[in-house]
Amino acid sequence: AQTVTQSQPEMSVQEAETVTLSCTYDTSESDYYLFWYKQPPSRQMILVIRQEAYKQQNATENRFSVNFQKAAKSFSLKISDSQLGDAAMYFCAYRSPRGGGSNYKLTFGKGTLLTVNP
Amino acid sequence: DSGVTQTPKHLITATGQRVTLRCSPRSGDLSVYWYQQSLDQGLQFLIQYYNGEERAKGNILERFSAQQFPDLHSELNLSSLELGDSALYFCASSVGGTGTSGNTIYFGEGSWLTVV
């Protein structure tokens, strides 16, 4: 079974600075999808960025980018020019591309709580 | 706004009772997923439906059941409620169960269930 580990329960960053959130995962599959979701105090789960394992190029969405290291099974999220609105819980998630059984599900890490200091 | 609609947003009920949570997926999405988020268990996958049929089952208790209707909305039924069932229940949807286009899952705002 796949597992996702976020080793940083809490992180803080100064406004306008850059912060990197770590995520590692364990899988025997060669093809899969990885995601970062943001959960602000409103508790809504908001998709931040996704990465297909077959793509070597790291995904980027505006101020958010990932460092995907497939061999190391590492998927970190970099937030540049941090803003107060970035304060939230961030979850890393894994999904198998194949169906059958519970493979359709997202497997989540336990989350990293990001605080942005003004 | 993800396009996934959940009702009710908040619900308080007593132990032993039964509640129904409702979810309308994004327009065009055929898959619906239910997740439970509690403080001690984190985000747990409960069950998935695809176009009306159960597709995958996770850590869903026997006291819980779900279904997806012909119009693709879904309901999660929780019965014989216990204090430990208090949690945030998310519904999510995606276009399909497999294939590139079906691999992004969008979440609703969740239904807060408090069992007293």
Image: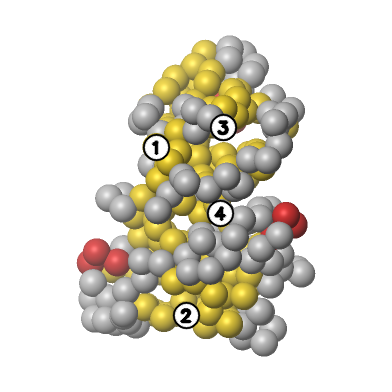
Co-location on one chain, circles 1 and 2: no
Q: Earlier in the sequence, mark 3 or mark 1?
A: 1
Along the horizontal axis of the image, is B8 left or right of A11?
right
Vertical relation: A96 (above or below) A92: below
Q: Which quadrant would residue A112 be assigned to in this image?
A: top left
Label 2 is found on which chain of the structure?
A: B
Label 4 is found on which chain of the structure?
A: A
Q: Secondary structure at mark 2?
A: strand
Co-location on one chain, circles 1 and 4: yes
Q: Which residue is mark 3?
A: A70
On residue A5, the disc is: 1
Of the two numbered discs 3 and 2 in the rendering, the one whose residue sits closer to the viewer: 3
Task: Give me the C-alpha separation between circle 1 and circle 2.
Answer: 29 Å
On residue A96, the disc is: 4
Q: What crowding class fits label 1: few (fewer than 14 Cα within 10 Å), some (14-19), or many (20 or more)?
A: some
Q: Which residue is mark 2?
A: B66
Q: Position of residue B66 (x, y in %)?
A: 47, 80
- Three-letter amino acid code at the position of disc 4: Ser
Task: Give me the C-alpha separation between circle 3 and circle 1.
Answer: 15 Å
